[in-house]
Image (tube, grey):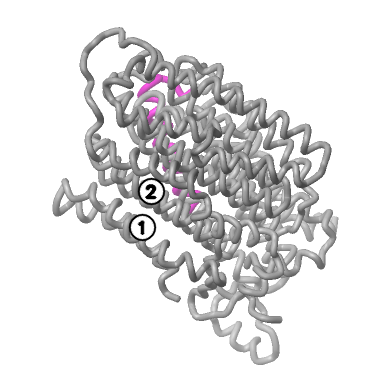
């Protein structure tokens, strides 16, 4: 139980990634595929945050709590680098999601369906 | 020192200038990409001698590496950056008249972003920064594939987006694991510390990197998106995707495998996967008798296989041959897609049969086409002969029985390649036009890039020594890891 408690964020991240991969691989609806990609993104974000997390420490924001602790040694904050990475990754993820959904709308206009099994104009 | 970041900053700034310029003048937008990329090309060429002498390390934000995001303008980076600017410039000239669909400012903006992503990815020295530039490149390619909003383009764009995004997710997971293990994102810093950890623990990370970058590089079996995307996109986009975008994937694979993780032991796997990609690509291209752009797209897969095979040899000679082939393929395939683009535009069909007898109608375009196909097949005196020769030479020099067997397959695949390219030449020159409606030559802006690329192929084929020092430097940069670490982090 203690092991699960320590690694709950990793378990959650991997679970989200697996859900995302499952949706991208199995689902035929283009919107659901994009949702799967969103799950994948979220899973990676949680993984990144989990890697930088240190138990019992606070957010890496320059605050009163951080200043007082800095006097006594190392500041009591978690690693800020993965959080910066996640901010970047969120922006990229939103961009991809928006682009993918807008292309899905165009596909729907051309084919009249969102079912990937019926969209096979390019198969040769 | 400040010139190197301009290589990335100029196309980025120009990209976001495009919509603003459109507010003032609709006609001026199309001239932004050629001007910006010409400036980039000049700066890049000016940097070549300095980068060859010693890699230029630019620290951003005033911190010293490994605490900042840094650019490393070494021979390999500058080679690929100049190649990107050169091919990008010629394709931008082509697009001045080729892209007619309004609003064209979106096209030019995305095109410049694609070039920004490619240039940034090859120049950066930070693994997460590599990912970001890679994503810029990929997202611009997704959008441009679907730019015409037609049936094929949107479907291909969606496929490309889903597969590319899954690949990017794998790269990001790998980066998370790298950060967890090493606590740094600087590539030189990681390279410095790799020896201190158990190599088996790096296996998963390297596998994730190879699969993630392999999607963009279109190595088999991750290449399902490429034939659709490259054949459905506008001709100028097919050209930049084939010439530049997939090469960045190969570069990233080589960089992570050799410089970052120092795993030359992977040679057997990389050589084998390269040869499988080569055979699959060439045979698929041979079977593609209908759609000429699809044939060229499959041919790109084959060529990527050859490049991966050359890098997979894990020797500096092999990387030299791979880089040479990379340059040759970038020039020749850009030429082919551009030339075929106007042929398709003139006859109004992508079918190979409809191009019959165009050799008389469009003499310059078809002659350039012939030069490019001969170069890709590897006939002397074109660039492809020298590059294939150096790959075979490097493969034989490794003295490994498996590689000998693979070289035989590579040469057999070249024969297949000759088969379909000569079919194209035969169609252009030795068939009579079924309907004698005159089509006329492509406009000047369509001819200039094609002719310049053709001349470059011949010049490189006749005088390979103009390119040899930079290729040699680039190949050495991949394998001399200690030098790379020393240049970036300073003397220990």
Residue bearing the label numbered 2: B88
- Tell whether label 1 touches label 2 (CB within 8 Å): yes
Secondary structure of the residue carrying numbered label 2: helix
Residue bearing the label numbered 1: B11
**Nearest to the observer: residue B267 or residue A6:** B267
**Nearest to the observer: residue B431 or residue B304:** B431
- Which of disc 1 and disc 2 is earlier in sequence? 1
Magenta range is: A92-114
Q: Where does the image place residue B152, in percent across and percent down from the top left?
A: 41, 24
Q: CA distance from mark 2 to mark 1?
A: 11 Å
Of circles 2 and 1, which is in front?
A: 2
Q: Is residue B255 left or right of residue B226?
A: right
> What subunit carries mark 1?
B
Q: Is residue A107 left or right of residue A79?
A: left
**Nearest to the observer: residue B44 or residue B92:** B44
Q: Residue furthest left?
A: B24
- Does residue A18 appear in the picture of this structure? yes
- Does residue A31 appear in the picture of this structure? no
> What subunit carries mark 2?
B
Q: Main secondary structure of the magenta part?
A: helix
Q: Residues within 10 Å of mark 2 (few under 14, many from 20)?
A: many
Residue drawn at 85 percent across, 55 percent down:
A1
Residue drawn at 73 percent across, 54 percent down:
A10
């Amino acid at each position: 139980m203690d092991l699960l408690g320590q690694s709950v964020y990793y378990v959650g991240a991997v679970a989200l990634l697996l859900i995302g991969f499952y949706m991208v691989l199995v689902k035929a609806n283009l919107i659901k595929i994009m949702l799967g990609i969103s799950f994948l993104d979220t899973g990676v974000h949680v993984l990144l945050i989990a890697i930088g997390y240190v138990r019992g420490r606070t957010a890496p924001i320059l605050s009163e709590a951080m200043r007082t602790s800095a006097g006594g040694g190392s500041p009591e904050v978690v690693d800020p680098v993965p959080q910066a990475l996640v901010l970047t990754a969120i922006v990229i993820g939103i961009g991809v999601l928006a682009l993918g959904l807008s292309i899905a709308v165009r596909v729907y206009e051309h084919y009249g369906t969102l079912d990937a099994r019926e969209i096979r104009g390019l198969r040769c | 020192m400040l010139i190197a970041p301009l290589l990335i900053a100029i196309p980025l700034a120009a990209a976001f200038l495009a919509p603003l310029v459109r507010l003032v003048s609709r006609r001026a937008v199309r001239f932004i990409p050629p001007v910006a990329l010409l400036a980039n090309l000049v700066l890049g060429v000016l940097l070549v001698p300095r980068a060859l002498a010693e890699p230029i390390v630019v620290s951003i934000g005033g911190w010293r590496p490994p605490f900042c995001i840094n650019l490393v303008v070494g021979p390999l980076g500058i080679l690929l950056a100049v190649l990107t600017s050169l091919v990008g410039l010629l394709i931008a000239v082509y697009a001045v008249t080729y892209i007619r669909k309004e609003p064209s400012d979106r096209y030019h903006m995305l095109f410049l972003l694609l070039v920004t992503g490619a240039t940034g990815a090859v120049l950066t020295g930070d693994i997460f920064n590599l990912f970001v530039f890679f994503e810029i490149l990929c997202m611009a390619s997704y959008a441009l594939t679907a730019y015409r909003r037609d049936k094929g383009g949107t479907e291909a764009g969606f496929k490309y987006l889903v597969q590319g995004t899954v690949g990017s997710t794998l790269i990001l997971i790998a980066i998370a694991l790298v950060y967890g293990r090493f606590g740094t994102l600087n590539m030189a810093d990681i390279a410095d510390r790799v020896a201190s950890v158990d190599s088996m623990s790096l296996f998963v990370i390297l596998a994730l990197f190879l699969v993630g970058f392999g999607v963009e590089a279109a190595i088999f079996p991750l290449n399902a998106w490429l034939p659709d995307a490259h054949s459905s996109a506008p001709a100028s986009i097919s050209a930049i995707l084939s010439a530049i975008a997939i090469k960045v994937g190969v570069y990233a694979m080589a960089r992570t495998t050799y410089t970052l993780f120092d795993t030359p032991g992977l040679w057997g796997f990389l050589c084998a996967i390269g040869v499988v990609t080569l055979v699959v690509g060439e045979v698929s291209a041979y079977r593609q008798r209908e759609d000429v752009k699809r044939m060229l797209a499959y041919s790109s897969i084959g060529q990527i296989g050859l490049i991966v095979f050359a890098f997979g040899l894990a020797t500096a000679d092999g990387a030299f041959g791979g880089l040479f082939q990379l340059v040759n393929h970038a020039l020749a395939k850009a030429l082919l897609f551009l030339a075929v683009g106007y042929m398709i535009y003139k006859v109004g069909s992508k079918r190979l049969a409809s191009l019959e007898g165009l050799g008389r109608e469009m003499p310059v375009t078809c002659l350039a086409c012939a030069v490019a196909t001969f170069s890709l097949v590897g006939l002397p005196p074109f660039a492809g002969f020298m590059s294939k020769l150096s790959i075979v030479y490097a493969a034989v020099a490794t003295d490994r029985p498996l590689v000998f067997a693979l070289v035989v397959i590579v040469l057999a695949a070249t024969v297949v390649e000759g088969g379909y390219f000569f079919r194209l030449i035969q169609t252009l020159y030795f068939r009579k036009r079924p309907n004698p409606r005159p089509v006329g030559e492509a406009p000047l802006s369509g001819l200039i890039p094609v002719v310049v690329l053709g001349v470059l192929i011949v010049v490189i084929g006749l005088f390979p020594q103009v390119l040899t020092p930079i290729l040699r430097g680039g190949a050495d940069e991949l394998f001399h890891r200690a030098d790379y670490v020393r240049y970036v982090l300073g003397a220990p």
